[in-house]
Each structure stands twice: as C-alpha cells, then as structure tokens.
Amino acid sequence: MPVIAPMPAARPARIPNQREGAGADEALAAGTTVDHLTETYRAHYRSLLGLAALLLDDTASCEDVVQEAFIRVHSARKRVRDPEKTLAYLRQTVVNLSRSALRRRILGLKLLSKPMPDMASAEEGAYDQLERDALIKAMKGLQRRQREVLVLRYFADMTEAQVAETLSISLGSVKAYGSRGIAALRVAMGAPA
C-alpha cells in the first residue's frame, strides 16, 4: 500500500493588529468620501459654476473658484463627517472664494492708475443677452448680502433656512435681505413696484 504524506496544516488567516485595522477603516472611509465627492462633482459641477457666475463676472474666475472649492473640500474630507453635507460645504466654499476673488479685484482696481476699458461681448445684439446684462448689472449694484441671498435663494434654489445656514445668518435676516434685494432690483431694472 502506498504511503500518503499528511497534508500540511493550513496557516490561519493573519488578523490585522489594531493599528493596521484602524488604517484600513480610515482608508475605506476616505475612499467612500472621495467616491461621494466624485459623484457630487459630476452631479453639481454645473450648478456650482452657475452659482459662481452670478457672484463673479468672468468664466475663467468662476471655473477657478469651483475647482478650488472641490480641492479644499477634498483636502478637508476627514472633517466632513456627514457625506450628505458635502454639497452644502461646496456651496459655502464657492461663496467664500467668490468673495475673496472680488476683494482681490477691488484691491487691484484701487491700485490701477486708469480704469480698464469695457469689452463688448460678441452676443450683445441678442435680446436675451441684453436682459441678462441688465440683470447682472443690477445685481452688482446690490449690497453684498442682498446679492448672496438672492443668488442662493433663486439660482441655487435653496430654501430660506438653507440660505441662513450657508451664510451663517438668521432666518429673519435672510427674509429681510431678500425682500430689500428684490425691491432694489425692481428699481434698478425699471420694473413697476
């Protein structure tokens, strides 16, 4: 009879120690956050770009602001405990970066010796473009808070409570800035009261 050699005992699966296990959990959580951020980017990039466009005046700056917002939220992903709030963080970051861009421009304009000439757009002849230009000009004439409330409320389609949370102001302030902003827009656009 042939002799059969016994099979070697299977090695037990290696159990990661606490330090390795925690790192794996963090990597998994970070991967989930990155995946959620990627989904948010795909779903909301255009709307965030539009939000920046209403606060700023040129496409390049808007794209820069939105890209920087995604970079900052990605860098701070460990602090974002609730992935569902990623969009809110991004909106707030876009608003804050737009403010910073406007501050830099104002400082730059103060340092310039002569004003820059206005550049006519190629679509100036279109009626829609004229209306849009008039609205943007009227929006720029509003106070900063009024403009931000109106942009978030009507362009980003946020509720008054969401606007209050995003701008860190009270709900009553949102209502007041909103109604005053609309009244100022009516006057600026020549609409009947």
Image (cartoon, grey):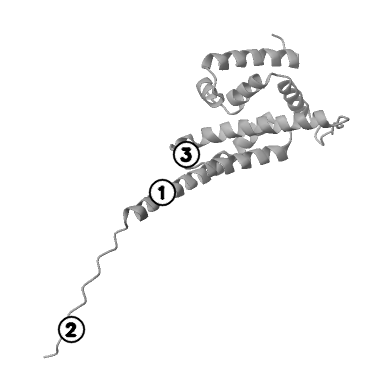
| Residue occupying image coordinates x 76% and y 27% | 133
Say whether residue 155 is visible. Answer: yes
> Residue 121, image x and y in percent?
81, 35
Q: Is residue 160 left or right of residue 58?
A: left
SS at badge 1: helix
Residue 125 appears anywhere in the view = no
Q: Residue at x 60, y 39 (%)?
A: 69
Mark 1 neighbour density, 10 Å: few (under 14) some (14–19) many (20 or more): few
Task: Give me the residue at 67% from left, 32% from top.
Answer: 100
Query: In the figure, 172 relative to 89: above or below?
Result: above
Q: Which residue is mark 3?
A: 79
- Left or right: 119 in relation to 191: right
For marks 3 and 2 on the same chain, the one whose residue lies earlier in the sequence: 2
Find the distance from the CA under tag 1 to the CA under tag 2: 45 Å
Q: Nearer the viewer, mark 1 or mark 2?
A: 1
Residue picked out by circle 1: 26
Give the residue displayed 17% in from the left and 80% down from the top. 6
Of mark 1 and mark 2, the one earlier in the sequence is 2
Question: The C terminus lies in which quarter of the figure?
Answer: top right
Where 141 sits versus 9, above or below? Answer: above
Residue that badge 2 annotates: 5
Query: Dots 3 and 2: beta carbons under 8 Å?
Result: no
Disc 3 or 1, which lies upstream in sequence?
1
Amino acid type, mark 2: Ala
Alpha carbon distance from label 3 to label 2? 57 Å
Q: Secondary structure at mark 2?
A: loop
**Kind of residue sitting beneath label 3:** Arg
Tell me if label 3 and label 1 are in contact, CB under 8 Å: no
Q: Nearer the viewer, mark 3 or mark 2?
A: 3
Name the spot of residue 147 as percent of width and height, x first: 66, 22
**How far is disc 3 from disc 1 in space, using C-alphas?**
12 Å
Q: Residues within 10 Å of mark 2 (few under 14, many from 20)?
A: few
